[in-house]
Image: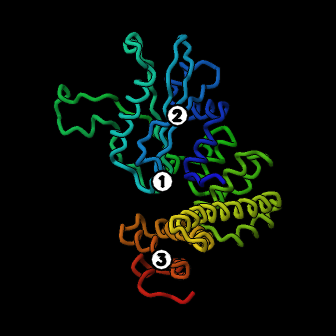
Amino acid sequence: MAELHNPHDTLFRALLSDPGRARDFLRDHLPNTIVGQLAPAPPEILEGSFVDEALAGSQSDLLMKVALTSGTDAFVYVLAEHKSTPDPALPLQLASYMVRIWKRCAGTGTARLRALPPIIPVVVYHGAPPWTVPDSLRDMIATDDPDLAFVPGAGYILRNLRAMEIDALSRNAALRAGFITLRQEALAFLAEIAGSLPEGTDLRRQVLEYVLRVYNVDLDALRATLRTGGHNELEALMGTIAETLLEQGEARGLARGKAEGLKAGEARGLARGEAKGKVEGKAEGKAETLGRQLERRFGPLPRDIETRIAAAEPDRIEAWLDAVLDAPDLAAVFAQDRPH
């Protein structure tokens, strides 16, 4: 069974990997001075990612090649920042990614180095805290002398989804529905989202899966809301997705359990490993849910709290999940163990 991928990355790529939606994104979110230079053809979505491996869980990227009215080509590099708070190092990271793109484009041919295509960097942010990152790498250099501030890139185009009006997110209904979901406002615009994403489409499923994996949502309450709104197909799809996510979590734990049993070289080790794997899979899913809820209420978690959650038994995690609902602060959640 396939591994669970980062939910932010999965939805981001699903939204922009469609050439039609990608074209609408560019026309909605690039400056008019750039849009006026784009040829009518949809962009070409290129394979590959340039994000540092250590940041793959908090950043997503997509590279497009666009035709210009001048007859030449350019790249549009879209970097999505998924961290709950802005990363002040982003301009430095973005500059390194752009250099990697140019290197790949040039290959081993020296002639290409004298005619590198333009790269238009676009940063998409959907976190709740205000964007406080420097506007360019130049702003990060400690000098007031422009003759000393040598930089590989002048800046980037920021699209702060949280700071935009709903109607300004996109004229493309499906793209707007996806951005609303990334803003974690899908439940408030449920009817619009259901109407914008046709039944049976991959994007409809991916949006609902994102809600189930990322939102702090009461499943029974969501089912009731869908039923009341007449969204019977979404209610049925929700049950299928929830069951699949649970099975995937169990499968990952099961694989670890099998490895543990085989390594011990005992005939009974495999059976014990399988049983332990199922328990670990369910516990891991609950631990991820607890971490998301704590971050949403109290902000980024200290390392000792993350370690404590990772080492906790399932019943202890259940108790903390209950405590999150009415705890006034993070310390109160862990002040005492509550009965399961």
Q: Is residue 148 left or right of residue 131?
A: left
Q: Residue at x 59, y 61 (%)?
A: 255
Q: Is residue 79 above or below residue 271?
A: above
The secondary element bearing badge 3 is classed as loop
Amino acid under label 1? Gly
Q: Nearer the viewer, residue 38 or 269?
A: 269
Instruction: Kindly report the distance in space between the C-alpha atoms of the residues bearing marks 2 and 3.
Output: 37 Å
Q: Earlier in the sequence, mark 1 or mark 3?
A: 1
Q: Is residue 29 above or below residue 129?
A: above
User: Residue 25, located in which quarter of the rendered image?
Assistant: top right
Q: Residue at x 43, y 81 (%)?
A: 334
**Residue at the spot of label 1:** 127
Q: Nearer the viewer, mark 1 or mark 3?
A: 3
**Residue at the spot of label 3:** 312
Q: Is residue 289 visible?
A: no
User: Residue 215, located in which quarter of the rendered image?
Assistant: bottom right
- Residue sitting at the far bottom: 339
**Residue at the spot of label 2:** 48
Q: Earlier in the sequence, mark 2 or mark 3?
A: 2
Image x and y of residue 157, in percent: 44, 35
Badge 3 crowding class, 10 Å Cα cut-off, few under 14, some 14 to 19, many 20 or more, is: some
Q: Nearer the viewer, residue 225 or 15?
A: 15
Q: Residue at x 56, y 31 (%)?
A: 47
Q: Is residue 105 above or below residue 197?
A: above
Amino acid under label 2? Gly
Q: Nearer the viewer, residue 194 or 78?
A: 78
Amino acid under label 3? Ala
